[in-house]
Amino acid sequence: MAVNTDATNHVQLQLESKEVWYLDGSVVLRTGNTLYCVYSGILSQWSDVFKDMFSSAQPDLKDVYQGRPVVEVFDDPEDLVHFLKAIHDHRYFETDVLPVVAHMVAVLKVATKYEVQYLRSAILQRLVERHCVTTLSLFDDLCDSGFQATTLKDFILIANNARQCGAQVLLPSALLMCCEISYENLIHCDLASSCNLFKAFLPTVKQLTDCLTSAECRITFAECASTFDAALSIIPFISFSSFCEVFQSRLCLPCFRAWKDSHAEGRQELWDSLPSFFGLPTWQEFKQQSGCTF
């Protein structure tokens, strides 16, 4: 409903939010021309920033709406809606359906700004566990699922907001997935300077002394190296299973096992070094800084 402010205030068309308007709320937040009636006690309980804002607003009630003090904030209206829903109802993201990544990033941004630590930590943990994973095994699980819960647009959004939210732990996986974007498109999503395209390791397995079919294995290794080289330029960290069926029947068992072991070791070593490709701290340092239990 579009309404005007009280006569004591400057005349300005204002709109009550249809999504966040508690009839018995105690304070009205305003961003732009949109009003949100919320509970000052809840916001103050979790945020010292809000607590100080409300305290300073109380003595001088120059801006009042329906008898409630109006506090001006400067946040994106859509981001603020998701934040207010989350802080007023802890079940907001506790559903059987995976939350929309854009909504979680919105809450992360606002929760970081107003220092709502419990909400910030909860969102960060969920993003780390389900989208921007920090272990190779979880990355493989996401690959197996076809990244059904996360789109390339989501990874771009995360990458563009992680630093300002102090959530750099999300960057290695997000930037890795952004490596699939062409350079021309990267220019338009603010990632060109930080997202360096690279190839994952190329397994260099020497034939074993106990190789059973020397000539055939040598030819097969040459072919597999060429195939991996082409694939890895497009899909970093491609899994061994993607190619094992193609070459398994052409290698003797000792060579095949050695190749598989070498590939697993190489992938893990590269994953451990992934943050360094983007000039970021190590995984261990991220763990200590973020407080996440990943």
Image (cartoon, grey):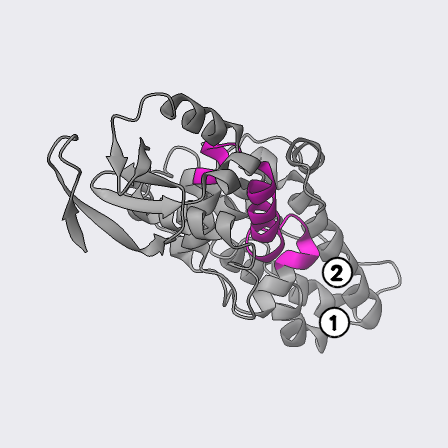
Q: Which part of the image, by quadrant, shows the N terminus?
A: bottom left
Task: Give 226 or 130, whichever is nearer the viewer.
Answer: 130
- Is residue 273 a member of the stretch shown in magenta? no
In this view, 147 is above or below 179: below
Residue that appears at 59% across and 33% down: 276
Q: Residues within 10 Å of mark 1 (few under 14, many from 20)?
A: many
- Is residue 129 a member of the stretch shown in magenta? yes
Residue 278 numbered tag: none
Q: Which residue is mark 2?
A: 259
Query: Which label lies toward us, 1 or 2?
Result: 2
Residue at far left of view: 11
Discs 1, 2 touching: Cβ within 8 Å: yes
Q: Where is residue 70 drawn, in percent x and y?
A: 30, 34
Task: Give 175 or 15, whichever is nearer the viewer.
Answer: 15
In this view, 156 is above or below 137: above
Q: Please name the amino acid that badge 2 sits on.
A: Trp
Q: Which residues are magenta?
A: 110-139
Residue 251 numbered tag: 1
Secondary structure of the residue carrying numbered label 1: loop
Q: What predominant SS class does the magenta segment belong to?
A: helix
**Counting residues from the N terminus, which is met first, the one under dot 1 or under dot 2?**
1
Residue that appears at 30% across and 26% down: 61
Query: In which quadrant of the rendered view does residue 71 lie?
Result: top left
